[in-house]
């Protein structure tokens, strides 16, 4: 059973999902399982001593590769293309040790690391040390695989489909590891010889469940069709083989000829009827007329009609991956009428949106994809925005391609070209998501809303030193950031933060706080140049702030004004919209409640209202009334309810509806 399941799973995945992440490694593991089980079968059945020795060596060699293969498959499934340094080191070291010992087991069977003779047994040291060392190494690989699965479950969050997949993988690996441990320790801990192999076979049954029921490498629809197709085809093939085995001797005896007439004719018939029978079986598996039509389209495109799924089936897992990667509250895809078609996580059309992007097919809008706010409350960064833009292109292509498949089966050449483009876009998107954000040593300042500052992707939570208040230091940083090249006068800072303190103590507190702030901005560096002093005014050095949402907001508005078409302008305006989380420096201590900030705050709030009105007008021109109404309502809310232009636009939209 273990041999049959290993071959079946390997061939199913390699023929139907070989480009999916983790699939090639899984196929390699099933090949090693087949390479281990088949020699064991030969070893137990053969009477030839030489064949038995060769089979035993091969079985031991492939058995040495199974722990590292399990480890590699688990890492490919859980890491999603983003291996850590420790994971890479563990995997490379495990492969180096496993391949070396597998080669030794095959070519030098008397010198392998084992708990029982024949084994590597140097004089004065003994073979037990090396045998137990290799046992410990294999157990460590199994333990690392289980630990990575647990880590993946912790990171799955609210993604129920991902969690179910990882639980199925955990069950598979857990049972398989139990069988592997019994086999590894069989020389030291006597146990029934069938028990370890039986647990491995049960692990392969669970692997079949993970592949076919939980869509580990195949989408649910493709997995179900592949299961039914291979099962039905396998039964037909089994009947044919049984008939040949049973009838061939009878035919030879009856006709009195020593020639495989029946077998030869059967091979000719099978070759001649393979294509029509295969088509008929696929039709029985597909069932409905619509599915049979899609089957014909796939065949005309030269694709595997069982392996290929309708393109829009790629949307739900793509949304789940995006939500998980960016830490979003949810993401949803709407059609042209504003109705939600696909969603993952929280889908609230009336709630705030982190970023809304139009879905365009041949420059025609077919809906929108909405990325919900981040769970951290921060806006998307420029790098994340570019990835979401690429994701919108992939999602639009997937949905549009599915509609074309349903509408026109005769435009085959155009569909084939677009299918290749969308598949390439999906591969590039997956690779880009795996690379993550580029490292940065400067500060990322989020000031449009509550003040948040990141360095290297981590929030700065404490601003002052041991003798300087953190809130006071944060206020001075905000003051310096707001003033920019104009700089900060010490007296202004004292008046803002220490208004009731005598001048000498206030001066001491200012310099102490400034010193703590310098150490925060450049930790571990003496003689910090993060804050300069020129012409009796303090300024932030230009290299301190690597990026700020205020500057990015202004840049996106300028780019929208210079855009040559509505699509580009919409993209820039939506990115600017996603950066604005609320009033400028809303919760900043001291400075956020002062008169110093009001003018700039009002200016940015007004620009945001203008942005929303411009967005509403562009969506209205494109015929996307739900998105336009959402923009006008938000503009009216930000303006305090007094925005006649938005009222008129909403009345116009309601009248058109």
Image (spheres, rainbow, N blue to C red):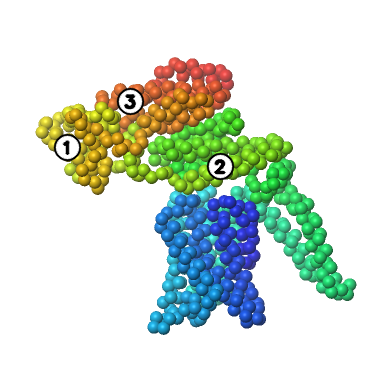
What residue sits 83% from the left and 63% below the top? Answer: 265
Mark 1–mark 3 distance (CA, rounded to whole Å)? 28 Å
Residue drawn at 28 percent across, 30 percent down:
484
Instruction: Judge by depth and name the residue closer to the eye, 188 or 599.
Output: 599
User: Is 446 displayed left or right of 44 in the figure?
Assistant: left
Residue 482 drawn at (x, y percent): 29, 29
Q: Which residue is mark 2?
A: 425
Figure quadrant of the C terminus: top right
Residue 606: x, y in percent?
A: 38, 22
Task: Give the mark, 1 or 3, whose residue is nearer the N terminus.
Answer: 1
The local secondary structure at tag 1 comes to: helix
Quadrant assignment for the N terminus: bottom right
Gap in angstroms between the C-alphas marked 1 and 2: 54 Å
Instruction: Relative to 137, say whether 429 is above or below.
Output: above
Q: Which class describes the residues within 10 Å of circle 2: few (<14), some (14-19), or many (20+)?
A: some
Mark 1 vs mark 3: in front:
1
Label placed on residue 396:
none
Q: Mark 2 or 3 closer to N-term? A: 2
* x, y percent for residue 417: 64, 40
- The local crowd at label 1, few if under 14, some if 14 to 19, many if 20 or more residues have their Cα within 10 Å, is few
Q: Is residue 272 above or below residue 498?
A: below
Looking at the rendered structure, the number of numbered marks drawn on it comes to: 3
Q: Residue at x 20, y 40 (%)?
A: 515
Q: Nearer the viewer, residue 323 or 339?
A: 323
Q: Can you identify the residue that label 1 sits on?
A: 511
Q: Which residue does the numbered mark 3 point to in the structure image? A: 601
The spot of residue 197 in percent (x, y) is: 57, 70
Dividing the picture into quadrants, the one containing residue 635 is top left
Q: Which residue is at 48% across, 57% downward? A: 75
């Amino acid at each position: 059973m273990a041999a049959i399941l290993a071959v079946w799973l390997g061939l199913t995945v390699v023929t139907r999902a070989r480009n999916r992440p983790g699939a090639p490694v899984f196929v390699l593991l099933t090949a090693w399982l087949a390479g281990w089980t088949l020699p064991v079968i030969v070893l137990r059945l053969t009477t030839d001593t030489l064949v038995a020795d060769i089979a035993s060596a091969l079985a031991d060699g492939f058995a040495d590769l199974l722990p590292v293969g399990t480890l590699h498959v688990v890492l490919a499934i859980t890491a999603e293309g983003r291996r850590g340094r420790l994971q890479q080191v563990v995997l490379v070291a495990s492969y180096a040790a496993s391949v070396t010992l597998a080669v030794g087991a095959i070519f030098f069977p008397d010198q392998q690391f084992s708990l029982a003779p024949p084994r590597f047994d140097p004089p004065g040291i003994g073979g037990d040390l090396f045998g137990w060392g290799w046992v410990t190494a294999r157990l460590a690989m199994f333990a690392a695989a289980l630990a990575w699965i647990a880590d993946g479950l912790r990171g799955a969050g609210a993604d129920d489909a991902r969690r179910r997949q990882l639980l199925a993988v955990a069950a598979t690996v857990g049972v398989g590891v139990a069988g592997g441990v019994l086999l590894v320790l069989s020389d030291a801990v006597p146990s029934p010889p069938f028990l370890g192999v039986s647990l491995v076979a049960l692990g392969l049954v669970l692997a079949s469940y993970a592949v076919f029921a939980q869509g580990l490498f195949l989408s649910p629809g493709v997995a179900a069709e592949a299961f039914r197709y291979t099962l039905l085809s396998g039964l037909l093939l089994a009947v044919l083989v049984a008939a040949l085995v049973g009838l061939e001797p009878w035919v030879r005896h009856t006709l009195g000829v020593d020639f495989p007439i029946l077998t030869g004719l059967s091979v000719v018939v099978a070759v001649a009827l393979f294509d029509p029978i295969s088509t008929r079986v696929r039709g029985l598996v597909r069932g409905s007329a619509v599915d049979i039509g899609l089957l014909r389209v796939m065949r005309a495109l030269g694709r595997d009609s069982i392996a290929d799924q309708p393109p829009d089936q790629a949307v739900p897992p793509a949304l789940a991956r995006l939500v998980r990667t960016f830490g979003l509250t949810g993401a949803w895809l709407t059609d042209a009428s504003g109705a939600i078609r696909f969603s993952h996580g929280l889908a609230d059309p009336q709630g705030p949106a982190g970023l809304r992007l139009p879905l365009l097919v041949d420059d025609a809008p077919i809906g929108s994809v909405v990325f919900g706010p981040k769970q951290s409350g921060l806006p998307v960064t420029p790098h994340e925005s570019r990835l979401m833009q690429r994701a919108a292109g992939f999602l639009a292509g997937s949905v549009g391609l599915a509609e074309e498949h349903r509408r026109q089966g005769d435009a085959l050449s155009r569909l084939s070209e677009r299918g290749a483009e969308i598949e390439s876009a999906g591969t590039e998107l997956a690779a880009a998501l795996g690379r993550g954000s580029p490292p940065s040593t400067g500060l990322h300042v989020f000031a449009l809303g509550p003040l948040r500052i990141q360095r290297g992707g981590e929030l700065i939570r404490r601003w002052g030193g041991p003798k300087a208040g953190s809130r006071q230091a944060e206020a001075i940083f905000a003051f310096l950031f707001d003033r920019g090249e104009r700089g900060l006068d010490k007296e202004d800072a004292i008046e803002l933060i220490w208004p009731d303190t005598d001048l000498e103590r206030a001066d001491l507190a200012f310099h102490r706080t400034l010193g703590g702030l310098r150490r925060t901005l450049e930790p571990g560096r003496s003689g910090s140049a993060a804050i300069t002093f020129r012409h009796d005014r303090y300024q932030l050095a230009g290299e301190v702030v690597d990026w700020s949402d205020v500057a990015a907001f202004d840049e996106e508005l300028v780019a929208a004004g210079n855009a040559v078409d509505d699509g580009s302008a919409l993209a820039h305006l939506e990115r600017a919209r996603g950066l604005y989380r609320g009033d400028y420096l809303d919760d900043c201590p001291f400075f956020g409640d002062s008169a110093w900030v009001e003018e700039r705050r009002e200016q940015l709030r007004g620009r945001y209202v203008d942005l929303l009105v411009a967005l509403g007008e562009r969506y209205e021109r494109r015929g996307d009334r739900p998105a336009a109404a959402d923009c006008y309502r938000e503009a009216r809310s930000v303006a305090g309810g007094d925005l006649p232009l938005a009222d008129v636009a909403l009345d116009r939209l309601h009248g058109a509806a």
